Each structure stands twice: as structure tokens, then as C-alpha cells.
Amino acid sequence: MPKKLIIANWKLNPTTIKDAKKLASLISVKAKNKVVLCPPAVYLSQINYPNLGAQDCFWQDKGAYTGQVSPLQLKDLKIKYCIIGHSELRAIGENDSMINFKLRTLLQHKIIPVLCVGFGTTVEQEDMEVVDVLRAQLEAGLKDVDASKIVVAYEPVWAIGTGKTATPEHAEKIGIFIKAKYGIKTVLYGGSVNASNAREFLQQRNVGGLLVGGASLIAKEFNQIINI
Ligand code: PEP
């Protein structure tokens, strides 16, 4: 199996720097796959791991923008990746044009954006509708952006943190669609990935890796995933 990209999204966890450092120290640095840890932004400067990513950032480098994280600050910390457009942020008001600004700014600073797309309130929704929503999200998000420099994470919303996953075949189909239609080189799958189901996603040719939430907080389990 070729090396894949596995990104850990710690979300708003853990709640102390001590626990964050401990968790990072337990993650294998010589895994079989390429691994990126995305801790909360407040910990980024203190976590020691070969590849780090942020969970979000603003589209301006500096100025009167209270509470924001600047892509220039991320660059200064040598952060290589930044998740953008996670459904948990879209749910509280982030829209496609904000996402588009963020992607453009990150690319200017040579930080690789990991654009999350996904849809679906229920597992029953037809593939066709999924493709329509993905198309809308990708077309707006990628406007005037060099798509070949972006990683896309396909995450069905109903699969995030629920213990339910899409089928590996569905993830493969979406991977093929996104790569062919938008010129994206790497499409990840995300949504309730764990040590028991990761292998079947990684075995799909057009699934370039995984975006892992909950299971990335359990060092033993995450180490199993990244060493598949
Ligand atoms: C996520 O939040 O991107 C995610 C995939 O979460 P989980 O693995 O917990 O479903």
C-alpha cells in the first residue's frame, strides 16, 4: 500500500498543555504513513512533532481582528497544514466565501490547506445529492485557487463523531469524482475512523488518507491507524 496522509484533528482537546504534550509524545514519529497532528492553536508552539497543522485560521495576516489566528503566525511557527471548512465551523456560520479567502491566504504563505467538504444529515441521502452539494462547496471554495495544491477531506456530516461511517466503496467513488473534476491530488476520508475500520478505507486507491477526530486522542489506537 502506498504511503497515505493521516491527519489528527484534536478539536478542543485536551484541556491542559501537560496532557497535550503527553499525547503528542506518545504518537509514533516514524509511522508507516505521513502523519500530521492538529492540536488546538494555543498549543501549537509547544508541541513537538514532525508535522503540525492548525484547525482553522483567519484570512488576514494581522490587524484589528480580535480572537483570530493569522496564517502568518502559523507560518512563523513552521506549521505545514491547516484544516479549513470543517463542518463544525460551517455549522456556526463559516461560509464558502470565507473558506475561499482562507484557502487563498494559506496558499500565499505556502501552508497546505485541508479543505473539508461533506454533506448529509442522514445516511440515506442519495449519492447524487451528495455530489450536488460537494460540487457547490468545491466550486465556491476553490474559486481562483490552485486546486492541485490543496488536500480535500471528504467527511459526511452524519459520520462525524457518531460511530457510523460511509462505506469504503462510497469514499472511493467520491475520491475519484473530486480528483477527476477538480484536479485535487489527495482526497482524505473522515468520519468515525478507528483502528478497526481504517484499513479498508486506506486500501481504496483514491482515498489518499484519513482525517481522524475522536480516535486521534487515544494514542494506542491512533498509532495502530498510522502504522497500517
Ligand atoms: C472530524 O472531526 O474531522 C472527524 C472525522 O471526527 P471523528 O473521527 O471523531 O468522526
Image: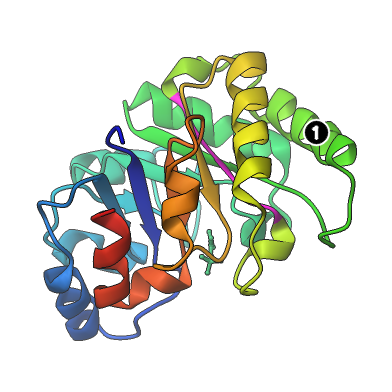
Left or right of 217 in this view: 198: right
Residue located 49% across and 48% down the image: 201
Q: Position of residue 11 (x, y in %)?
A: 45, 68
Q: Could you tell me which quadrant the N terminus lies in?
A: top left
Q: Residues within 10 Å of mark 1 (few under 14, many from 20)?
A: some
Foreground: 150 or 226?
226
The answer to whether residue 56 shows anywhere in this view is no
Q: How is the image coloured?
A: rainbow
User: What is the quadrant of residue 37 in the picture?
Assistant: bottom left
The answer to whether residue 53 shows anywhere in this view is yes
Left or right of 104 in this view: 133: right
User: Relative to 30, does residue 136 appear above or below in the rendering?
Assistant: above
> Which element type, helix, strand or loop, lies under badge 1?
helix
Q: Position of residue 24 (x, y in %)?
A: 19, 69
Residues in magenta, as a range: 150-156
Q: Which residue is mark 1?
A: 131
Q: Position of residue 68 (x, y in %)?
A: 46, 55
